[in-house]
């Protein structure tokens, strides 16, 4: 079963994504702040990471950058979650190596489509 | 009347006797001295008006006599008696009259009289002249203050100027002003010729308080004051003496400084030896002249404060909307995600479908509202980032048509596109154009009954061909060519009287019809503001029951229009982020501009990144926006151009250019 790590400080959003991902047949791991997220990413080495931008302790951009510059983890696809209004996030997200960029509120079909794009069905 | 005193200087007894006989005793009193020393003493002690000098006197050096007499009694009339024309130079230059040879009574009297009259006239003239000079000075002072009054809007500065005016045009022993500073605290400013005793200082405070309270005996005073909270300020001219309570016995003038209902303070002025009527006039004039600008200053201060409050409120509102929208977004994401999860991963009983669909629809609506609110708060805070590029919007029109056809299918509405001018380039943020068009077509779908048609057409028009009675002001400011997009529907239409306001913020919330159809009513207001940023326009035309036409126009891409749009964005950014830049305009004969552009190291390529050239007949105007440039840069740049032209007379036979610049962010923002 493909492993997906979801990192977001909003527990209910993590819950929503987890529900959706598990119902679609993925194994889901959750972290609720940036530091834990980075630690878990290195321990679990998931097949894909869904990452929120605005988080306490360490923001999504930093995690993405740290992972993408490390040869051990650079191939893990990263989907960034951000608020629609923060247009400039998209640009920074691309610079930090995120593979996809998803705005909140998201369509679950959209999220699932993008996940399967990287992981297959 | 006292007789005119005449002194005769002579050591010749015959001459003394002779003159004594000749002098008219009714008008004159004759004295005589025989030697120089006694004569000088007499001049000092008795102050005669006339001196008659016998230059045949012995023991006197006539060359030094004029100086000695003048220093003993300045301005005396000197008449010289001489037996012949042999008179020393010094005497000739100095004396007022000469009587040579034998002198008759009439001659002597006439000489004395005419000289006395001359002197009288001279004195009168001098006096008048002195008065004129003084009046002139006073007038000048008054004029200066009144022009300074007009130049300032600060209350404190005006009071200070008033004091200066009184100081310069009136002679006084003590003058005080009781006024109120910006915090409405009473301030007592005292100007005094001499130092003040502590007791007098304390007493002046009391005195000013009493005067103030007397002014408002039967009505409420504009400010509460008591002796303790008065701020005391004194200016002393000289410490050779000290003023005491006797000052209150001096002549004084008092006035309140007010204009209509506004009270600004009071002023009192003291002088030991009394004021003249001119002084009173000057005092009144100064007080009168300061009242009007004080009132202006007062109003200006009020406006300023209101403005500040409004700006703060506007900011709070903007921040509030932004924070609330962000906060709303998270729970909304969760609700939406979970509802979608339920719909996707569970098979719900048929009966539950309408309920779930209603929830979904309303989530979408709420999400739209939040996005609109965020857009509005961003636009208003000047934080909207536009990604302008030269582009066509044909694909956007087609994409909007095909996306929204899906929604329109529910009502069996057909959306057709009619792009009459294909591939027209505009300078726009394509995502924003998409947003505007989606909004207009969405509205059209909402308000159009089933089975009708919506048409999106696009064509190029010159600004002069665009007419609309109601939106005249919107269209009047346009010039040049525009790409016009029209969304035509066959819907319910809008009443003429409401047309004007459809682009106002929250307008549709007031409108029950649109409430049924949903939406915040912010969409059209956002569209209008997005188009403003594009130097475009939005307007509409409608007839009840027949349908509506919503138009928007984007300037067709030219160097100039693109520059103006980008510059608008730059100015906005400068305001928000304090980014510095300057726009510099150089205008000259075509050839001169071409040559300047070809100069090495003058107009750098990077200056031309944001620029445009406009040629009108034989004149070319080059406009550049130069990032990070400040006032100094603009001045130096001008200097460089001037130097280049002066140093290359062959290429630039005449140095005829127009140069102007604007620095951003503009001062005051």
Image: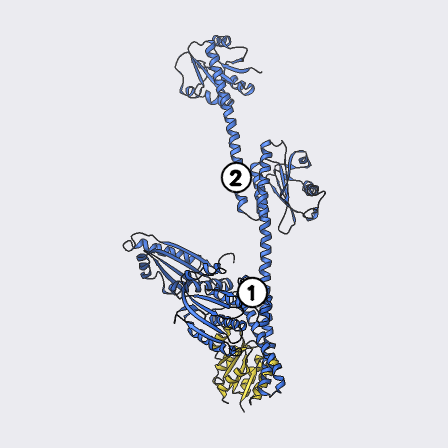
Secondary element at image label 2: helix
Farthest residue toward the front? B545
Q: Which mark is residue B143?
A: 2
Q: Residue furthest left?
A: B650
Q: Residue at x 31, y 61 (%)?
A: B598
Q: Residues within 10 Å of mark 1 (few under 14, many from 20)?
A: some
- Residue B661 lies, in percent from the top left, at 42, 56
Name chain B's colour.
Answer: blue
- Locate residue B331, reporting x and y percent: 61, 77
Q: Nearer the viewer, residue B415 or B99?
A: B415
- Check the residue under mark 1 and report the chain it is in: B
Percent position of residue B4, x then y: 54, 16
Q: Is residue B228 above or below residue B390?
A: above
Are circles 1 and 2 on residues that touch, CB within 8 Å?
Answer: no
Q: Label 1: which residue?
A: B505
In this view of the protein, which residue sits in the foreground, B347 or B165? B347
Give above or below for B391 relative to B144. Answer: below
Q: Residue B556 appears in which quarter of the rendering?
A: bottom left
Residue farthest along the right direction in this orientation: B218
The colour with which the image depicts chain A is yellow
Find numbered disc 1 in the image and state the secondary structure of the residue it sits on.
Answer: loop
- Of tags 1 and 2, the one toward the viewer is 1
């Amino acid at each position: 079963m493909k492993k997906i790590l979801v990192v977001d400080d909003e527990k209910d959003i993590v819950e929503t994504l987890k529900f959706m991902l598990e119902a679609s047949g993925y194994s889901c791991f959750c972290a609720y702040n940036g530091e834990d997220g980075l630690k878990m990413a290195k321990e679990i080495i998931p097949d894909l990471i869904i990452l929120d931008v605005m988080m306490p302790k360490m923001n999504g951009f930093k995690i993405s950058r740290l992972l993408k510059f490390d040869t051990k983890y650079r191939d893990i696809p990263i989907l960034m979650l951000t608020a629609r209004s923060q247009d400039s996030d998209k640009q920074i997200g691309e610079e930090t190596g995120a593979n996809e960029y998803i705005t909140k509120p998201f369509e679950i079909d959209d999220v699932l489509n993008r996940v399967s794009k990287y992981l297959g069905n | 009347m006292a007789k005119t005193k005449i002194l005769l200087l002579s050591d010749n007894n015959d001459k003394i006797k002779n003159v004594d006989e000749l002098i008219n005793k009714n008008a004159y009193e004759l004295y005589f001295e025989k030697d120089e020393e006694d004569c000088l003493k007499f001049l000092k002690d008795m102050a005669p008006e006339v001196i008659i000098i016998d230059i045949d006197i012995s023991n006197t050096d006539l060359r030094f006599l004029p100086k000695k007499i003048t220093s003993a009694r300045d301005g005396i009339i000197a008449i010289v008696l001489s037996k012949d024309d042999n008179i020393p130079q010094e005497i000739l230059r100095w004396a007022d009259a000469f009587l040579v040879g034998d002198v008759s009574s009439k001659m002597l009297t006439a000489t004395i009289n005419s000289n006395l009259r001359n002197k009288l006239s001279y004195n009168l003239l001098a006096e008048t002249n002195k008065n004129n000079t003084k009046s002139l000075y006073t007038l000048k002072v008054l004029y200066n203050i009144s022009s300074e009054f007009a130049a300032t809007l600060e209350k404190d500065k005006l009071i200070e100027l008033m004091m200066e005016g009184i100081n310069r045009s009136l002679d006084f022993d003590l003058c005080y002003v009781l006024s109120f500073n910006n915090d409405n605290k009473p301030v007592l400013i005292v100007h005094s010729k001499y130092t003040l005793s502590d007791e007098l200082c304390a007493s002046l405070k009391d005195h000013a308080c009493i005067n103030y309270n007397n002014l408002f005996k039967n009505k409420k005073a504009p400010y509460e004051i008591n002796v303790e909270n008065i701020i005391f300020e004194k200016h002393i001219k000289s410490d050779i003496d000290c003023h005491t309570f006797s000052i209150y016995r001096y002549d004084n003038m008092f006035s309140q400084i007010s204009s209509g209902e506004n009270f600004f303070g009071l002023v009192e002025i003291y002088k030991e030896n009394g004021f003249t009527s001119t002084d009173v006039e000057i005092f009144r004039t100064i007080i009168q002249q300061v009242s009007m600008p004080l009132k202006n200053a007062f109003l200006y201060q009020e406006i300023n404060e209101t403005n500040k409050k409004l700006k703060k409120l506007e900011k709070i509102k903007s921040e509030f909307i932004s924070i609330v929208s962000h906060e709303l977004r998270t729970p909304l994401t969760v609700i939406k995600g979970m509802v979608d999860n339920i719909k996707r991963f569970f098979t719900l009983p048929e009966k539950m479908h309408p309920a779930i669909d209603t929830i979904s629809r309303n989530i979408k609506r709420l999400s739209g509202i939040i996005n609109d609110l965020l857009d509005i708060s961003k636009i208003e805070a000047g934080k909207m980032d536009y990604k302008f590029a030269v582009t066509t919007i044909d694909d956007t029109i087609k994409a909007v048509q095909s996306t929204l056809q899906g929604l329109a299918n529910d009502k069996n509405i057909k959306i057709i596109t009619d792009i009459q001018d294909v591939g027209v380039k505009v300078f726009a943020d394509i995502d924003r154009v998409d947003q505007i068009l989606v909004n207009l077509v969405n509205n059209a779908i909402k308000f159009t009954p089933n089975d009708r048609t919506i048409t999106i057409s696009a064509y190029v028009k010159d600004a002069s061909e665009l007419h609309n009675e109601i939106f005249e002001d919107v269209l009047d400011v346009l010039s040049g060519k525009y790409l016009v997009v029209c969304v035509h529907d066959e819907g319910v239409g809008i009443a003429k009287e409401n047309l004007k306001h459809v682009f106002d913020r929250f307008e549709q919330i007031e409108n029950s019809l649109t409430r049924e159809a949903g939406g915040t009513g912010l969409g059209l207001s956002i569209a209008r503001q997005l188009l403003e940023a594009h130097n475009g326009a939005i307007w509409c035309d409608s007839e009840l029951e027949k349908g509506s036409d919503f138009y928007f126009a984007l300037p067709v891409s030219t160097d100039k229009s693109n520059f103006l749009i980008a510059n608008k964005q730059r100015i906005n950014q400068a305001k928000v982020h304090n980014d510095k830049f300057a726009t510099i305009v150089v205008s000259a004969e075509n050839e001169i501009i071409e040559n300047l552009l070809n100069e090495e190291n003058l107009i750098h390529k990077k200056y031309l990144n944001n620029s445009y050239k406009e040629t009108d007949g034989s004149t070319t105007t080059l406009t550049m926006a130069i990032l990070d440039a400040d006032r100094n840069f603009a001045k130096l740049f001008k200097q460089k151009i001037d130097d280049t032209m002066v140093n290359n007379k062959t290429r630039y036979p005449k140095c005829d250019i127009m140069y102007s610049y604007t620095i951003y962010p503009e001062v005051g923002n």
